[in-house]
Every structure is written in structure tokens, then in C-alpha cells.
Image: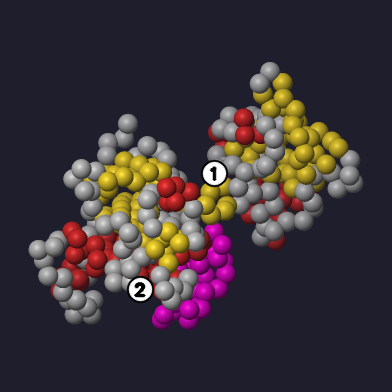
Amino acid sequence: MTPPIDTEALVIGAGPVGLFQVFQLGLQGVHCQVVDALPHVGGQCTELYGAKPIYDIPGIPYCTGLELIERLQQQIAPFKPTLHLSQQVGSVERLPDQRLQVITSTGQTFRTPTLFIAAGVGAFVARRMTLGGLADFEGTQVFAEHPAPERWAGQHLVVAGDGDTALQTGLDAGQGPQAAASVTLLHRRDAFTADPNLIAQMRQACADGRMRFVAGQPTGLRTEAGRLQALELLNPQGDTEWLSLDVLQTCLGLSPKLGPVAQWGLAMERKQLVVNTENFGTSEPGIFAVGDINTYPGKKKLILCGFHEATLAAFGAVALLRPEEKTLLQYTTTSTLLHQRLGIA
């Protein structure tokens, strides 16, 4: 068991609003821990808008989603937040001392007086291939989460998908000390959404015999002695064929799931958390919700609105954490204290 982590603040979600929440808490002298289901920061901004242009961030005429996340990481660097990635929050409960106990999918426990839910439209989780009986082999021969070479070393690998991750996984799996015995890229048709450069590399690898491409839609599976042996495919010609494999790595993209948030006993409206507009607190004291996960009269799902919400939520948290102190509004242009916290004094 991992020892519980005691922290003044816990932020759920490492997207742009979650990262800016870290910044605003840091300005208030509050160090925080951050949890995200993805293996990297950025959330929806990197998953859906990584290379796409964003024009409505104040003071930044143009940037991509990835560039915005990079700038936010630079901004929060002075506060050294502790990141806990590739894990999803499962449960939240109130302790006798009124702190909140938060447990993640990896078994990590946090105890905190303030919790900030910046989960956007939910945790991003890997899409699974929908095929009867396939789930029985999840974690042994079938993987939907982050590709890892140790899974396919010396094995006959099938990679399903048509995006960047699928093609890059197939290319990587055919080389190095943990190379697969064979690599097959599977997609329903010979058309891809991946970067053109990756598509060209994949086609060259197929021409060189380092991997192959098979077009078809999985319709069934064959098992023997408790192991998955092959996928039944319906090919573009309407014929049935079998694709043998040892390991199946699906790279079918990510989808947002509200998940356990709905079970935390917080007031909700249309799958969003109801908050007040004074400090963006939820129906439960000490729990704040910022960004696309919340709702209130006049709510607009814009990043800049999330930044505003995170600012007021940070002030609300300080009022709970230090009720005996008078919270003064200070400016980063002139405040010696804020300069110290930013490391520029």
C-alpha cells in the first residue's frame, strides 16, 4: 500500500484550466497535488486540439493546443506541483476531521481540505474494441491503454487503429531489443487519419516487409486452451478471413467519461456540477469545480472562462484554509510576496 498523501489542495484534471488552477493556488501560497487519467498533462487541449489553432486566449493572438499547454507548464513551474498521471479518481469521502479522502485507480490515497475538480467533460479513457468475449483477455493478451514494448517482445502483434498512435506503435514494435516477431496493422479500410509522414513511413515499412497492413472489420474471435488465437475479420470484399495473433494492441483513440464523479454525492444538472459564482464551490464544502465540468446561469464553455473560475476558486480555498487571515488582493506587478512565490524576487 502506498502511504497516504496529505496536501492542502488536490486538483483533479491536468488540462489548461487544471494547470491554471495550480498557478492561482501557487500565488496564494498553496501547494497542490494533481491527478489525471492520461499519462501526460494537457487533457482535451492536447488530445483534441493539439495541432489546431486557438485564437481566443488573452494576449496570445495564436497558438496551438500543445503550445498553450507548454506555456501553462512554464507558468506553474515555480510552484513545483506534484503530478500523479495515468490514474483516475475513484472515490471521494468525508473524514471525521472534515478533510476529504480521495482514492485513485492505482490505490493512491490523498487527504485534503480542498478539492478542485477540473475534469473537463470527464476523464479521457481509451476506447475499447467492441467484440464479444474480447474483454476476457484484457490485460493479458489485449491492451487498450498506453502501448508498451514489453507486451509484444517476440510476439505476433496486431495493432488496431488508423491514427498517429496506431501507426507509430506499429513502426516502433518492429524494431529495437523488444521487437515483436511480426507486426500487423489492422483497420477497416485502407485510409488513415494519421499524419501523412507517418502514413508514408508505414507504407514503406510494409513494402520492406517490416510490417503488413490488413483491412477488415473484426466480427469474432477464436480461442484455444484459454488463449486468444485469432480474430475473425470481414474484409472489404465481404469475405471472412482469420487473423492470427499473440497480442492485440488497440489504438482507437480516447473518449471522455464522467465516471465516478456522478457517484460523489454532488449536486448535478445535465451531467455537470452545479456551482455558485462567488467561489465556484459545489454543494459540498471544500469541493470546487472549474472548467467544462461545472454549470451555473450564463455558463460558457470557454478556456478563458475556466481561467476566471480557477482564480475565484483559489481565493475561495484560501478563505477555508486560513479563515483567521484577511485575504488581500495583490498584484504580480508590484507584490514582493508574489514575486517571492514566483521565484523572481
Q: Position of residue 248 (x, y in %)?
A: 66, 36
What segment carries the magenta color?
47-69
Report the residue marked by disc 1. 146
Report the residue marked by disc 2. 308
Residue toward you, 185 or 17:
17
Q: Position of residue 95 (x, y in %)?
A: 24, 43
> Residue at 11% across / 66% down in the picture?
325
Q: Is residue 21 left or right of residue 211?
A: left
Q: Is 54 included in the stretch rendered in magenta?
A: yes
Which secondary structure lies at badge 1? loop
- Residue 249 lies, with reference to residue 48, above or below; the image says above
Of all residues, the one furthest to the left in this rendering is 324
Amino acid under disc 2: His
Q: Is any part of residue 140 visible from this angle?
A: yes
> Residue at 73% across / 56% down in the picture?
192
Amino acid under disc 1: His
Task: Please tell me how many numbered marks the rendered image carries.
Answer: 2
Residue toward you, 199 or 298:
298
> Residue at 36% across / 65% down in the picture?
275
Tell me the quarter of the image containing the C terminus. bottom left
Which secondary structure lies at badge 2? helix
- Cα–Cα gap, marks 2 and 1: 33 Å
Q: Is residue 16 left or right of residue 180?
A: left
Q: Is residue 342 left or right of residue 288?
A: left
| Mark 2 and mark 1 residues within 8 Å of each other at the beta carbon | no
Q: Earlier in the sequence, mark 2 or mark 1?
A: 1
Q: Quadrant of residue 249?
A: top right
Of all residues, the one furthest to the top in this rendering is 225
> How would you rate the neighbour count of disc 2 (Cα within 10 Å): few for under 14, some for 14-19, many for 20 or more?
some
Tell me the quarter of the image containing the N terminus. top left
Q: Position of residue 153 (x, y in %)?
A: 60, 32
- Residue 249 lies, with reference to residue 120, above or below; the image says above
